[in-house]
Image (cartoon, grey):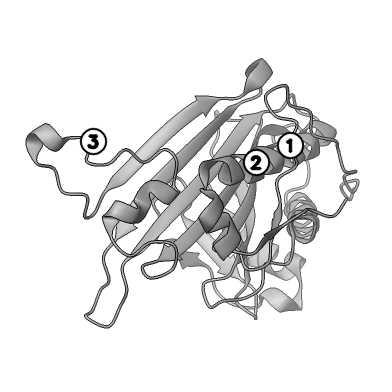
Amino acid sequence: MPTTLPVRYGFVSGSSHLTPPDYAHPPLIECWLGVDFVDSLEQFEVDPTALRESLGAEWFGSWQTVADDTPGHDRQLENVMGDRAVRLTSCGFAYGWIGHQGERYPRYETIRDGFVTALDAIRRVTPGTERRLSPKRWSIRYVNRIPQGTVWVTTGDWSFFRLWQPVPLAVWDADSQGYKGRWEFPLPAERGTLAIKFRHDSGQTAEDLDEVRIMLHAKGPVDGVDSELFEGLDYGREVVVRSFHELIAIDAQNYWGASDRLP
């Protein structure tokens, strides 16, 4: 049976009443919506060939091993345009947009529709497992790439990211080059967690620029009901968008073309 399309849930937060802006050209390069299913005792398995056929002609490629620092994401199938992907994990799957070549972000609602289509496809090729394919956890992850020469030139400019503390281990004469930081925050009312990663990558060649990556990953529990899954994804998206806005200095917001979000 096809999954019922989700309705848009309102986001309610006691910690913020401000609406974050839209960005004309955000540094976003990946957006992933994911789900873990109820049955964690048995590894989630799906026939990858059958799933590829169920997804449709746009997905005729081959499954590839994922080179990613996110545990559990082991197989990935991209669409013919290379800007969408399905990732299978041991507990569920994720559906994402990939914009590494400068593709324009198609908006969250479009990615969510693609996630629902992929969820239906998985359920079609795994009949008789309704309980196992009930949602247990929602997940949403945004990856931002910020090259050197944009809002920062030297590590001294990393103050555009409000969690950055200059030379946090000065007593050890620590070098900021190659810095990796991770913060994790509980969400209100035990709705899950928000993990934030800040990473500096050096260019691979003399012509390549250094870059900073900022990753925001929200996830939370679901009580086996699709409506809670969709509500959780909508909530997580707002958590991520608002958190990015609050973590970025005003000059950086202006650089990326911040403007009032349309209702």
Specify whether 57 is left or right of 86: right
Q: Which mark is residue 168?
A: 3
x and y, in percent, of residue 257 in the image: 64, 64
Pointer 3: residues within 10 angstroms few (<14), some, or many (20+)?
few
Dividing the picture into quadrants, the one containing residue 153 is bottom left
x and y, in percent, of residue 197 in the image: 42, 44
Residue reaching furthest front?
Answer: 251
Q: Residue at 30%, 46% (x, y): give it.
A: 180
Q: Amino acid at mark 1?
A: Leu
Q: Earlier in the sequence, mark 2 or mark 3?
A: 3
Nearer to the camera, 62 or 256: 256
x and y, in percent, of residue 208 in the image: 30, 78
Residue reaching furthest left?
Answer: 172
CA gap, disc 2 and disc 3: 26 Å
Above-or-below relation of 243 to 114: above
Q: Secondary structure at mark 2?
A: helix
| Mark 2 touches mark 3? (CB < 8 Å) | no
Q: Is residue 34 visible?
A: yes
Nearer to the camera, 51 or 169: 169
x and y, in percent, of residue 165 in the image: 32, 38
The residue that mark 2 highlights is 242
| Mark 2 touches mark 1? (CB < 8 Å) | yes
Q: Residue at 14%, 36% (x, y): give it.
A: 170
Q: Earlier in the sequence, mark 1 or mark 3?
A: 1
Q: Amino acid at mark 2?
A: Arg
Q: Residue at 13%, 43% (x, y): give it.
A: 174
CA gap, disc 2 and disc 1: 9 Å
